[in-house]
Image (cartoon, rainbow, N blue to C red):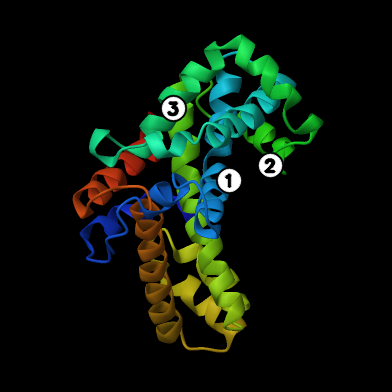
Amino acid sequence: MSDTTRPESIREAARGGWFGPTHWTVVLAAGRDEGPDALRAREELCRAYWQPVYCYLRRCGRGVHDAEDLTQGFFAHLLEQNAFAKADPARGRFRSFLLTALRHYAADEQGRARSVKRGHGRPLLSLDHDVVEERFLRDPYPNATGEVLFDQRWATGVLEQALARLRADCQRRHRLEEFEQLKRFLAQEGSAAEYAAVGEVLHRTPAAVRMAACRMRDDFRRRVRAELARLVSSPAEVEEELRHLCVVLTHGS
C-alpha cells in the first residue's frame, strides 16, 4: 500500500460529518431496465468491482485466462439477467450480494462455458488484466482466502478511486504540481523539514504548505466517504464500512 493510501488517512474520516444520503443510488439505478442513468450505473459498478472479482477467482485456483473469461462472463451475466435489480439494501451490503452471486456463477461451469461465447468473442469490458495480475502475484498475504482478497481489492479500489478523483480535480484547477508534491502528506502530517522542502518547489512558506496539505487531506477523506456512500443505505453504514476498510488494509482480513 502506498503512502497516499495508508489506513491512517482513513481513520480520521470516520470522525467527520461529510456523508450525503445517496442510499444505493448507483445500484438502484443499475437495476432499472432502461435509460442512460441505468447504463452508466451498470458500467460504473462493473468497473468498480472487476478487480476484486478477478482476484477472488485467481485466489480460488483459476488460471489467468480462465479468470479473465469468468470475470467478463460474470458481469455479462449480471447485465443480461438484470441481477442488479435483485440487490436489496435491506439485506446487506452490495459487495456481499456481489460475492454471493460470484460464488454461484463460478460454480456453474455450464454458465461459464456459455459466457465465453457471449458477444461473439468481444469482451464486455476493456480491462488491464496485466496490471491486476501483477498486483495479485505481489500480494503480501498469499495465504489469504479468496473472500479476504476480494475485500482487500475492494478497499484499495475505494482509495484509488478517491485519489484519482482528487487528482483529476486538481488537474482541472491547474494545481497538478501541487497535488504531486502534497500527496505524500495524505496519510499523515509531514515534518518541518519536509514542508520546507516542498515549499522550495512550490515557492511557498512551510506554514502555507502545511495548511495546503491539511486541506488536501480533508478533501481526500471526503472523497473516500463519498465512494463508500455510493453503495450503502445509511450514514451509519458508512462508518461501518470505514472501520471495515481500515481493518482490511491494516490486517489483511
Residue sitting at x 45%, y 47%:
32
The residue that label 2 is drawn on is 125
Q: Which mark, by number, is residue 81?
A: none
The residue that label 3 is drawn on is 99
Mark before the other along the chain sequence, 2 or 1 = 1
| Side (left or right) of 109 relative to 249 | right
Res 156 seen here: yes
Res 138 seen here: no
**Residue 134 place in picture, x, y as percent:** 68, 34
Mark 2 touches mark 1? (CB < 8 Å)? yes
Q: Nearer the viewer, residue 94 or 223?
A: 94
Q: Nearer the viewer, residue 130 or 233?
A: 233
Q: CA distance from mark 2 to mark 1?
A: 8 Å
Q: CA distance from mark 3 to mark 1?
A: 15 Å
Mark before the other along the chain sequence, 2 or 3 = 3
Give the position of the C terminus as an image quadrant: top left
Identify the amino acid type marked 3.
Answer: Leu
The residue that label 1 is drawn on is 47
Q: Nearer the viewer, residue 20 or 213?
A: 20
Q: Nearer the viewer, residue 102 or 183?
A: 102
Mark 2 touches mark 3? (CB < 8 Å)? no
